[in-house]
Image (cartoon, rainbow, N blue to C red):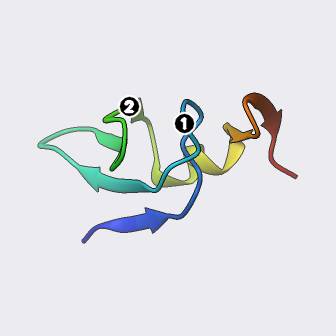
Amino acid sequence: MVLWKLKNCPRCGGDVFIDRDLDTWYAQCLQCSYRQEMATPDELDRQPVATGGELVPEE
């Protein structure tokens, strides 16, 4: 099952999908291919989001 976070890439602000490999969860941007491994899928909610060229923590 793939989860989507729209406009949530910390690098470019693009759309991120969350999926699982054999043993880890990861988030990968569809536009710039930024990839981040995570312990749980909820970990992405605590990451900063790109807004207008600067990183701002999501509230």
Q: Residue, x 54% and y 42% (percent of image)?
A: 9
Q: Residue at x 16, y 44 (%)?
A: 21
* Residue toward you, 39 or 6: 6
**Count the marks: how many?**
2
Q: Pick the residue in front: 2 or 16.
A: 16
Q: Would residue 3 appear left or right of 5 to someone viewing this image?
A: left
Q: Dot 1, crowdedness within 10 Å: few (<14), some or many (≥20)?
A: many
What residue sits right under mark 1 in the picture? 12
To which quarter of the image does residue 23 belong?
A: top left
Describe residue 17's horizontal placement relative to residue 56 as left or right: left
Q: Is residue 44 above or below residue 19?
A: above
| Residue 20: x %, y % from top left | 24, 50
Residue 2 to residue 51: above or below:
below
Indicate the secondary structure of the residue bearing disc 1.
loop
Using the image, determine if residue 5 lies above or below residue 27.
Answer: below
Report the residue marked by disc 2.
34
Left of 52 or right of it: where is 16? left
